Amino acid sequence: MEPHNRTRVSQFFLLRLSDDPDLQTLLFGLFLSTYLVTVLGNLLLILVVSSDSHLHTPMYFFLSHLSLADIGISTTTVPNMLVNLQTQSKSIPYAGCLAQVTVFSLFACLESLLLTVMAYDRLVAICHPLHYLVIMNPRLCGLLVLVSFSISLLNSQLHYLMMSRLTFCADVEIPHFFCELSQLLNLACSDISTSNILIYFISAILAGVPLSGILYSYIRIISSILRVSSSDGKYKAFSTCGSHLSVVCLFYGAALGVYLSSTVSSSHRKSAVVSVMYTVVTPMLNPFIYSLRNRDIKSALWGIIIRMA
């Protein structure tokens, strides 16, 4: 690449999920509905947890922050996609792309860490039920959330620094519907060897360690449940983990699907469609998974509806 073609671009061009105008209109309505349900559902979950004193427990404290992360992930990606679908445009300003990379990495990392913290909470609740309130005291819960936010913020700043150091050629088209650092690294004109090593190292640490912590927690939980003599006791103990385990499988399953689709398939459009799962669908489903399977949340929600009526 010649030096005069290397520049700090003013905008990027994103991949469209479809080039059919009629299908784009359908996608706009679908994604708008999904986004509104995501935001309203997670905000309602946060409202229910904060307004009902019976839900002021560690599990629901972490759940409310998980809902905040879900809103952040969806808000970082979907509104810009909706604007592009409505205006028939594929462009995103450089500053907007930089913001997407930074904020998305923050909330995605936060979600992963909060799921790990919630797995630890379930581990203590099932394996050490008599000492649960002593171990999971408000100070520790606040510290765990603060550490999760701090690590996520550090991760987002590393993503910001890596992208801000990249040099791109003119008319850069990103093979994705939002700005993702791994995609941008492949399009950079500057040397990315150090950035690649750093991004793989960060991904291995911030994805591998939380997932290992979740697996360890559930190995301990399953081992403890198997020692329970009665079948009712086993069901009751495991049912407290059902919602969390569903969300974990949905989040990491979608992330694994994105990785495998990008590795196996050469179609960027197919990989982008799979990415919709963890950026759009997963944040929308999380509040439903917790509310539909949880009697406490359903009763608190009905209490709010009755008071409002």
Image (tube, rainbow, N blue to C red):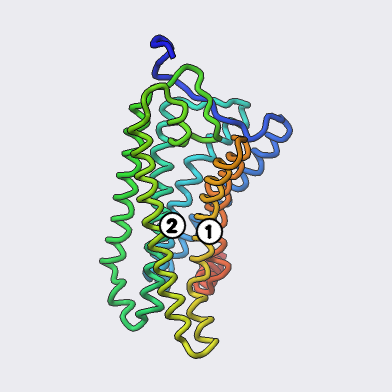
Residue 126, horizontal then vertical, whole percent: 41, 78
**Residue at the spot x=44%, y=14% of the render?**
1
Quadrant of the rendered structure where residue 144 is? bottom left
Pick the front one: 290 or 309: 290
- Crowd rating for badge 2 (residues with CA inside 10 Å; few <14, some 14–19, many 20+): many
Residue wearing tag 1:
286
Compared to residue 154, the image places residue 269 above or below, namely: above
For label 2, the SS is helix
Q: What's the residue type where badge 2 is placed?
A: Leu
**Residue at the spot x=45%, y=18% of the render?**
169
- Crowd rating for badge 1 (residues with CA inside 10 Å; few <14, some 14–19, many 20+): many
Label drawn at residue 66: 2
Going by the image, does 190 lie left or right of 36? left
Q: Quadrant of the C terminus?
A: bottom right
Q: What's the residue type where badge 1 is placed?
A: Asn
Q: CA distance from mark 2 to mark 1?
A: 9 Å
Residue 256, horizontal then vertical, whole percent: 52, 51
Quadrant of the rendered structure where residue 157 is? top left
- Furthest residue toward bottom: 229
Going by the image, does 153 lie left or right of 296? left
